Image (cartoon, rainbow, N blue to C red):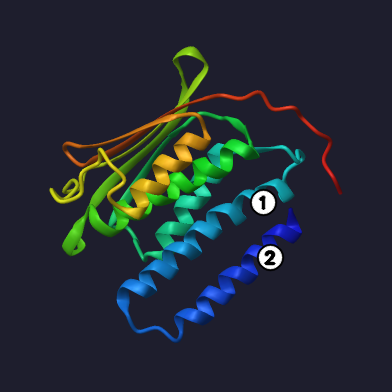
Amino acid sequence: HHRIKNNLQVVTSLLSAQSNYLENKEALSAIRDSQNRIQSISLIHQKLFQSESVSSVNIQGYIVELLKFLSYTFHVGKRIKFEFKLAKIEMGVAQAMPLGLIINEAVTNIIKYAFPDGRNGKVIISLDFCEDGLYCLSIQDNGIGLPDNIPTSNNSTLGVSLMKGLSSQLDGFIEITSENGVCVSLKFPSVTIEEQPAEN
């Protein structure tokens, strides 16, 4: 896992070097988004490297750390308050990775678009068990909502397309609504983790 993390850092550095030759704001933004996606994966491997288990991640700690990283990357400061309602869940890597990428996409879009002109806002991230052996993730902001030209019913943006594709990897169902802000809701089945001894 440490080797994978280092390899991902090399890719991030290459993207950073590439961005030095770009002036187009959209292209620079796309590269930064790609770097953040890589970081969300790298963080999983960092957590595994630090953990006693090689097969599961403390998802509560992972989500909090991912949000701290995004806040720092986008210079959020105290403008946006993040509130966490997270159950203590050990999640296998096969689920934690797409879940982390979904959270990365949702929160990135919120930071970019939900609170224009420097306005303050709040984002609530919750994850817990719900009915019939499912995990339920909710990411809710109190921002301006989605623009009318971005319908949530189809894959109209890269972020929405990615989130829907990743939810399929989890055998889950994702819903994006825009009322009193945007809410991303995801339900997906919990999977039993076969614990493995940690590797030194």
Which residue is drawn at the image coordinates 31% and 46% (left, top)? 155
* 126 relative position to 9: left or right: left
Q: Nearer the viewer, residue 157 or 46?
A: 157
Dot 2: element = helix
The disc labelled 2 sits on which kind of residue?
Asn
Residue at the extreme left of the image, as rendered? 148
Q: Distance between the residues labelled 1 and 2?
A: 11 Å
Q: Which of marks 1 and 2 is nearer the N terminus?
A: 2
Q: Which of 167 and 4 is in front in this view?
A: 167
Q: How crowded is mark 1: few (under 14 residues within 10 Å), some or many (20 or more)?
A: many
Among the 4 quarters of the image, the one containing residue 119: bottom left
Residue at the extreme top of the image, as rendered? 132
Q: Residues within 10 Å of mark 2 (few under 14, many from 20)?
A: few
The number of callouts visible is 2
| 154, above or below 188, in the image | below
Q: Nearer the viewer, residue 78 or 187?
A: 187
| 57, above or below 20, in the image | above
In the rendered image, which residue does mark 2 sit on? 7
Q: Residue 45 carries which label?
A: 1
Q: Nearer the viewer, residue 13 or 82?
A: 13
Which residue is drawn at the image coordinates 50% and 65% (left, top)? 35
Dot 1: element = helix
> Can you give x and y, in whole percent of width and height, for residue 17 in the image?
53, 81
